[in-house]
Image: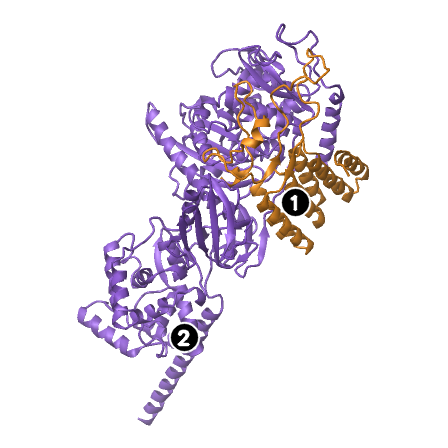
Amino acid sequence: MARFRRLLLAALGLLVLGAALEALYLDRLVVRQFEGRRWTLPAQVYAAPLELYAGLALPLPELEKELQRLHYRRADQPDRPGTYRLQGEHIDVALRPARFADELRPAQLLTISGGAGGIAGLRDSGGHEVPVLRLEPLLIGSIFPIHGEDRIVVTPAEVPPLLPQALKAVEDRKFDTHHGVDPLAMLRAAWVNLRAGQIEQGGSTLTQQLVRSYFLSSRQTLARKLREAVMAMALDAHFTKSDLMNAYINEIFLGQDGNRAIHGFGLASQFYFGKPLAELDLAEVSLLVAIVRGPSFYDPRRHPERALARRNLVLRELTEQGVIARADATEAARRPLGVSARPAGAYYPAYLDFVRRTLRRDYREQDLTEAGLRVYTSLEPRAQEQAERALEHELARLDKLRKNPGAPLEGAVVVTAPQSGEVIAIVGGRDVGYDGFDRALDAHRAMGSLVKPFIYLTALESGRYTAATVVQDAPVDVKLVNGRHWKPENFTRQVYGPVPVVRALAESLNLATVGVGLDLGLAKVTQTLLRFGLPQPPAQVPAMLLGAIDVTPLEVAQLFNGLANGGFRNPLRAVRAVVSADDKPLKAFPLQVTPIASPEAMYELNRMLVLVMDHGTGRAAHALLPAQLVVAGKSGTSSDFRDSWFAGFSGTHLAVVWVGYDDDEPTGFTGSAGALPIWARIMSGLGTASWSAPMPESLAEVHIEYPTGLRVVPGCSQDIVAVAVPGDATLPVRPGCGFPDTPTPTNAAAANTLIERAQQWLRGVSH
Amino acid sequence: MRRGAALRQARPRTRALRAPGTALLAALTLAACALQGPLPPQPQGVSGASRPGNTQPPPPAAGQAPAAPAERPAAPPPRQFHLSPATSSLVAQAQRQAAEGNFAQAEATLERALRIEPDNPLVWSELGRVHLAEGDAAQADAMGRKALSLATGDPAAQSAAWRLIADSLRARGRNEEAAEAERRGASLAPR
């Protein structure tokens, strides 16, 4: 018996020791979890901030839309950050504090005065003029890890005081006094559950909920409950109540968006209301507190009635416990849920895809999904939405025109700011919210006639051609190495004979272009394409001269960006800067330019691309564009109408549009019929500025007859175009059309300097 | 829209003349955003008259034979770039940052200025200067050339670009070319 007692004691001792060890282990575990990296912080991705300054062509109603996009609220008195007042020709805005890659800006008051068509001036609260100021950047998404936990961490200062009060009142009344667990509450819950025969009450303290969330398990076994209770007590012993409350606010699960789990009240506020947590009012805070109990059951987007009922229950609870006044609760209970239609973030999957790919070159996946980086991009929400709308609208129209409706047409768009090389919009397909196949980055399609500008640029740079040079549009027959003959045709199947270069390009004549390309040599044309950023040399077959080169829309944007930027290449960028969680700049992607073409040849070519829009395959666009806008561009159609392209630019924007089927079936649309209207619709909505590069001094502007290329004086013939040619070029003149017999308008002084300058230029380039 | 604030040129009236680079009328008509109509304060950019590349043949100069039309003006009508208040404040901020050795910040600030005035050669030259100070002479050279390509018709802006190119060449030991670039810069700007 004594032996048995000793044995029992020993066993008991072992058990206690085991339990103590277990408790010690749990203590260590939970403390480490709490103190170590408490949360994995997905990188937050921001759009480009809107720069405000006197002279910006943004009318006040448009500016108001921009404020609303950032979820600023109109108020009688803009006294809280995130509110504004519209008074006649002024907008007074209480700006929120903003974090930029290079600056932290405190909250401040700003008065914006409008004029006819734009912003006339900015003043601060002291009435001083502000030359330039950025609105905070729109949060456009985050890079969350595979298991999908996304969150925005908030500091206690960013939490409205009502939130912890409400959480305590509804979830854990004794939070301030208990030691991590509330036995009475547990017993009460157990009794209720026993009587109901199912789990109706949690009885868990906030601390217990926190522990459960840390260790990612919601199974309710007794052993688990015990471990959970031990860990909750450990946490309570080691940390202050306010630390625990702050942890809870940042940790807890509050919704699901596809494979993205919404954690923490900071992100939930953005996710449901599109604004910072600090700006939530009573009704909004109550809704979030209501959601805690069951984020999918009380999902305010899917089950608004349930969510509303529980929110009002929360409001009643708060009133009964004296947290809020009854009048306020009654008022709040009358309000609608106020949840935004689309969840914040994940708006622009194709653009985020490009951002992610850029970052993966420099960062490990873990850094992106856990380290709390802030990523500043050049996305312009207005341009992005314009591009999305244009693509959706026009593809729907084109679908109706097709004779054999089968799979829906697809498309992709890339928009850049050419001088900086910044990508401002990407659309990866017509279902813009769908995070799937990104055609802008991954559809490799034949570029068709988009290659022609690069052939003619090569021709101009060779010094043997000008815009006015007459070339032969004549049948081509090339014997290939395999013994076959390559006999391309014009789109119209006609042969045009002698035509000036400007017309061959404007009307996209295949035979004339192939003739020029073969004269220059495939190698020379390839060199030009590589200089402009084509990633790999194309197969050296004559068909490359008609665009048998597979490229993605993004690659086309890179190629054409060099044209739009006047012969300077800048690697296309979406990311401006990456900043650490503690505001240290980690990486910048600064503007880099490389001269890649002679400025003279480049100007001459771009003037011809303007004529494509005025005279050639792009002319249909003018019906959709502002009347005075000067743009340049080129259509592209691959063989059998499989791909319909348009790439073109103004002074401040480049847009590339592709339309086709995913399975490479013919569409029946040329570039002018399919992609061009989309392109024009995008450009017309961007508020873009005319292409207006200055003509280099060694060039001269001459007027030639469009059909023949003969030089004339304006007004002398029916069909005249103005082209830029080297100042020393001698052009044949049309007899009896305003010129004396000698065809020499040349500027003698400039005659040789052009070649000298070109050589000098290229020397400069090659080093 | 924000990029649209720069000056815009009116479209020439006839189809044959419908080309950019047309101008006298132009710079003054500034429709910063064609959708919204003209903006009253002229914020920035080219002052005075014109961009070169006028499509109108200029009237024959006095004393010249009218039968020998010159296609382009003997001397392009001068113009003068200057900075708008917004870009000017950003350039000043960038200069302070660069003086403190914060080149990356100075570059970021100048990029803001360039987004407002992407065609202003003065801003490009400023950005090139920061790269030069930072020791990236190749990028400084490239930006000088970019500035030069935009500065046509403005001797002061051309001269600034040439001097930047000269300094970037010199920084790479290409003294002969530097001297030539310097000479070009000096010939354009009244000292």
- Count neighbours of disc 1 (C-alpha within 10 A) and say few if under 14, some if 14 to 19, many if 20 or more: many
Q: How many marks?
A: 2
Q: From the top left corner, tell me how far across and down residue A330 is, in percent.
A: 24, 63
**Relative horizontal placement of residue A51, taking residue B69 as reference (left or right):** left
Q: Nearer the viewer, residue A534 or A754?
A: A754
> Considering only vertical position in the picture, is A686 above or below B56?
below
Do dots 2 and 1 share one subunit? no
Q: Which mark is residue A113?
A: none
Tell me what residue is drawn at x 48 percent, y 53 percent.
Answer: A110
Instruction: Identify the chain drawn in orange.
Output: B
Chain name for mark 1: B
Q: From the top left corner, tell me how far across and down residue A710 is, in percent.
A: 61, 11
- The secondary element bearing badge 1 is classed as helix
* Quarter of image, res B8: top right
Q: Quadrant of the C terminus of chain B?
A: top right
Q: Residue furthest bottom?
A: A2
* Quarter of image, res A712: top right
* Quarter of image, res A651: top right
Q: Is residue A450 visible?
A: yes
From the image, tell me which residue sits under label 2.
Answer: A241
From the image, tell me which residue sits under label 1.
Answer: B127
Chain name for mark 2: A
Q: Nearer the viewer, residue A472 or A590?
A: A590
Q: Nearer the viewer, mark 2 or mark 1?
A: 1
Residue type at mark 1 is Leu
Q: From the top left corner, tell me how far across and down residue A476 is, in percent.
A: 56, 13
Q: From the top left corner, tell me how far across and down residue A527 is, in percent.
A: 64, 29
Q: Nearer the viewer, residue A191 or A565?
A: A565
- The secondary element bearing badge 2 is classed as helix
Instruction: Identify the chain drawn in purple.
Output: A
